[in-house]
Image (spheres, grey):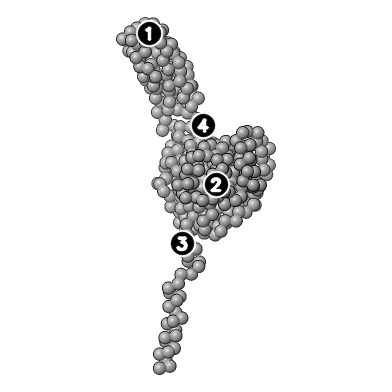
Amino acid sequence: MEKFLKLLLSLCLFLPALTVPSAAGAASAKEMSVHFINVGQGDAIYIKAPYGEDILIDGGRDGDKVVSYLKKQKVKDIEIMISTHPDADHMGGLDEVLKAYRVKSVYAPKVSHTTKVYRDFLYGVKKEGLKIKTASKGVKLAVKGTTAAFVGPVKSYKTDLNNWSAVLKLTYGKKSFLFAGDAERKAESDMIRAKENLKADVLKVGHHGAKTSTSEAFLKAVKPAYAVISAGKGNQYGHPSAEVLNRLKKYKVSLFRTDQQGTIVAKTDGKNIRFNVKPAGTASGSNPAYKLTASLDNTQPKQNGTIRLTVKGLPNGTDFRAVFHYKTTTTAYSGKIGTPLAVKIGRATKGYKVIIDVSAVYKGKTYKTQTFFTPR
């Protein structure tokens, strides 16, 4: 009987260990999600931390678009807002976010600007009753279950706003993210020289993939497995550049692009990372996606009327040439992509189909298209 009681007592002590999960086991099951919101030519990144904190890095140009996205994610308030630097395509939407949400703390680098965008941001922060905390090397953020700290800027860059970018490294478990803002080669070099730990699994590529960022030395320091480029489709800057895409390809980095794939979402349990879409690849630059198109507001105008030719398909502002082939003469005009070109057709022959040859050169490559009208 005594042996039986001892056995029963042993089972009672052993069973709870099998049935009750440990606190550490429960914590490891929590996920962190990072949303690279498609805001066109700009940056806006929403992070849902593993224990529920909401973090926003930049707000693109259009705050309404960011607020709409946050509402879809059922965000109630924002624990941490980070403005990487005062450029409008990063800071422009933050004032609307400040109006829409209770924000607990705001971080930004110690650099000012004279624009309305910057003044609106300051006013929004003041109205929220907050003071801006300085984002600089070594400043840590209290985000439960993670290690979050700024690795840049490491120094003053006077009026060079891009290099002032607040660069955040966020680590959860064994997986880490590096958000590079618009930091360029100078800031990248300074972070490397300052011996900052830049190694990360996911790199938010600096300055939308511009050739002035993401140097080979920086890629060697970060050693990313994945990279995300936030850029606008067909943007006038040609972002991302072929140079950066080729460097990412050289280092076998799996690439995601908002201009091609929309909003990119990465989720991690601290051990693995998964994305909502497959990588876009790094094999080619942005030029192959371009296709020149031409349209007229009226394809059957009256004699002596005015038609408006609109050319699209390349970055706005790119020069184009339009050659009108009338029945008895040929006339050439120059215009800008995205801006309607008004042309008075004079006494063009009624019923004669006037062909318009349109051509434009972008990054050394010539693009062509045609359209036509018939006077009546």
| Amino acid type assigned to the residue bearing label 4 in the image | Tyr
Secondary structure type for disc 1:
loop
Determine whether the residue tagged by mark 2 lies in a helix, strand or loop.
Answer: loop
Image coordinates of residue 231 in percent, x first then y, are 49, 37
Distance between the alpha carbons at the discs numbered 1 and 3: 73 Å
Mark earlier in primary sequence (3, 2): 3
Q: Which residue is mark 2?
A: 101
Q: Earlier in the sequence, mark 1 or mark 3?
A: 3
- Give the x, y percent position of residue 255: 45, 44
Residue 237 has which mark? 4
Give neighbour class at mark 3: few <14, some 14-19, many 20+ (Cα, 10 Å). few
Name the residue nearer the viewer: 174 or 150. Answer: 150
Name the amino acid, label 1.
Answer: Gln
- Image-quadrant location for residue 113: top right
Q: Give the distance between the C-alpha atoms of the residues marked 2 and 1, in whole angstroms.
A: 58 Å
Residue located beneath label 3 in the image: 29
Please determine whether, in this image, residue 34 is positioned above or below residue 25: above
What residue sits right under mark 1 in the picture? 303
**Within-10-Å neighbours for mark 1: few <14, some 14–19, many 20+:** some
Identify the element where label 4 is drawn: loop
Which is nearer the eye, 84 or 162?
84
Q: Choose the circle earlier in sequence order: 2 or 4.
A: 2
- Residue at x-position 50% and y-position 30%: 236
SS for tag 3?
loop
The single residue placed furthest to the bottom in the displayed view is 1
At x 49%, y 46%, the residue is 70
Asked if residue 235 shows in the view, the reply is yes
